[in-house]
Amino acid sequence: MANEQIGMDEEPEIIYIPDDEGNEEEFEVIMKFEVDGSDSKYMMVVPLDSEDEEADEVYAFRYEEDGDDLQLFMIEDDEEWAIVEETFNTLVDELDGGAEND
């Protein structure tokens, strides 16, 4: 049986990101992608310990993998952010079958 919905039946990927005080917070990786014409890889994550599920924010990071090591980089360039946001929105629309979620 083919799994058409990628990631739906799999265990969620959890990563730990230290906050400003050095406390590690749990995040679930909801999507990884590469931007066309770039060698950069990006991931979108959501916090697991959110008090208000409706207010969940999605965080985007550029990442590099070196074996089992994962390095995350903040996206600080407005142009890079616009490309990542557009790619993410396009991928979400494709996963939702183009349906609008208003």
Image: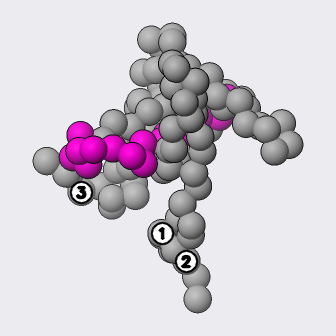
User: Of all residues shown, which one is farthest toward the left?
Assistant: 102
Which element type, helix, strand or loop, lies under badge 2?
Answer: loop
Establish if 93 lies above or below 40: below
In this rendering, does residue 52 appear at all?
yes
- Residue 19 magenta-highlighted: no
Q: Which residue lies under the disc numbered 2?
A: 3
Amino acid on which disc 3 is placed = Ala
Q: Which residue lies under the disc numbered 3?
A: 99
Gap in angstroms between the C-alphas marked 2 and 1 = 8 Å
Q: Determine whether, in the image, residue 24 is placed left or right of residue 93.
A: right
Question: Which label belongs to residue 25?
Answer: none
Q: Please tell me how crowded label 1 is: few (under 14), some (14-19), or many (20+) other residues with Cα within 10 Å.
A: few
Q: Which residues are magenta?
A: 40-55
Residue found 19% across the figure and 51% down from its top: 101
* Camera-side mark, 1 or 3: 1
- Of 71 and 79, nearer the camera is 71
Q: Which residue lies under the disc numbered 1?
A: 8
